[in-house]
Amino acid sequence: MKSENIKKRVLSYGPWEPWLKRPFFAFLVSLFSEGQTKAWFNKIGVNGLEYPCSVFYNGEWYKSEKNHEATEKSLEIFLQKHHISEITDSLENYYIESKKNILKLIGADKLDLSEKLNKIYLIIIPIISYIWATHALEHLMVKKLHIEVPRYVKRNVEDFIAKASSPEKKVAHNRLEDALRSGRNPADVAAEFGWIRARDGFARPFTVKEILEMKKQLKKSHRPKVKIPSQLKPLFSNAKELVYLRTQRTDVFYELLFLARPVFREAAERYRIPFSEMKHYTIQSLIAGKPKRYPKNFVWANYLDHSAFFTQSFLPKQEINRSSAVQGVPTQKGIVRGVVKIIFSVNDLPKVKQGDVIVA
């Protein structure tokens, strides 16, 4: 499909509005070029789902209500017959298999660079399906929670939803903290969990010094407790699993990319590109042996399994609401005064000082 046709298809699903800031460049975004079709969703067990469009512009994902409306019927059918834990189980099995396959690729001297890159891309595509399936489920689940919970909970509904949705399963950062509390060697902890910092595909991992600093700042772990009305327990059983899946699917995404770095370094050497600059090149151009670099402020549009990069935005200009108030869910109760630091990624953490208020 030609780029102009992709643009028309995407605009037909508008209006689009800014949704989620992420420090993504051309390489990471190009990995999202497939994985939104029924065929790929069927492979991860979410049969019938199709996520029509996605848009990324200047470091931010955009959202569209019409886009989500297209997913609701198939997800309603899925939730009538299945539990979200089936998706997380499927993801974790795929994660184990994919780690083995990437390690085999790294040691496969007989494969040429293009074949290795293409195989890594094919390993990543189902992860993209898990990512979009989670977003679609979250959009639907938020609606359901805000309809059902007020029927049984009359005060502090948002706070109740946040606490009652807190997952019992542990994600990578929880396991990192457990490792630090157990007294494990910081170098071993850095080797196992260093990838958590490298969330743009090419940034450096945590150092041992940073791991030691984390250990100093560890606080007592606690999970919020809340009594869930029996009528809401099935709904929150799925909600807990979804909150876990929301982090787990991106953890898998970033860890697999980190594991594949030897292949990306091989590509950087072959094409004489500084490794840190590889983030500006698409995976498709590297596979083709014709590296193509894109500036930071590109527009990327995707319609099913067709995507295109644009150097100028075609999205309608947005009116920015510069309200002095920020709404969200507090992680700790109380009133505090301090300098607010807005955190979009782990790379922003060094700007946080003792006494600052974090908005993340």
Image (cartoon, rainbow, N blue to C red):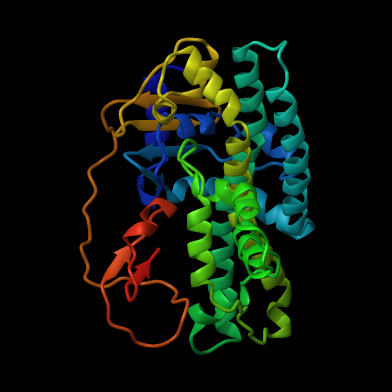
**Quadrant location, the C terminus:** bottom left
Q: Is residue 133 visible?
A: no
Residue 68 is situated, as x and y percent measured from the top left of the image, at 51, 49
In depth, the one of 25 and 6 nearer the eye is 25
Q: Residue at x 60, y 14 (%)?
A: 113
* Side (left or right) of 8 relative to 100: left
In depth, the one of 346 and 297 nearer the eye is 346
Q: Is 23 placed above or below 188 here?
A: above
Q: Residue at x 72, y 46 (%)?
A: 91
Q: Is 177 placed above or below 14 here?
A: below
Residue 57 is situated, as x and y percent measured from the top left of the image, at 34, 38
Q: Is residue 347 visible?
A: yes
* Side (left or right) of 206 relative to 357: right
* Side (left or right) of 272 relative to 136: left
Q: Is 324 placed above or below 43 here?
A: below
Q: Quadrant of residue 186?
A: bottom right
Q: Residue at x 56, y 48 (%)?
A: 194
Residue 301 is situated, as x and y percent measured from the top left of the image, at 41, 32
Residue 289 is situated, as x and y percent measured from the top left of the image, at 50, 10
Q: Is 112 placed above or below 220 here?
A: above
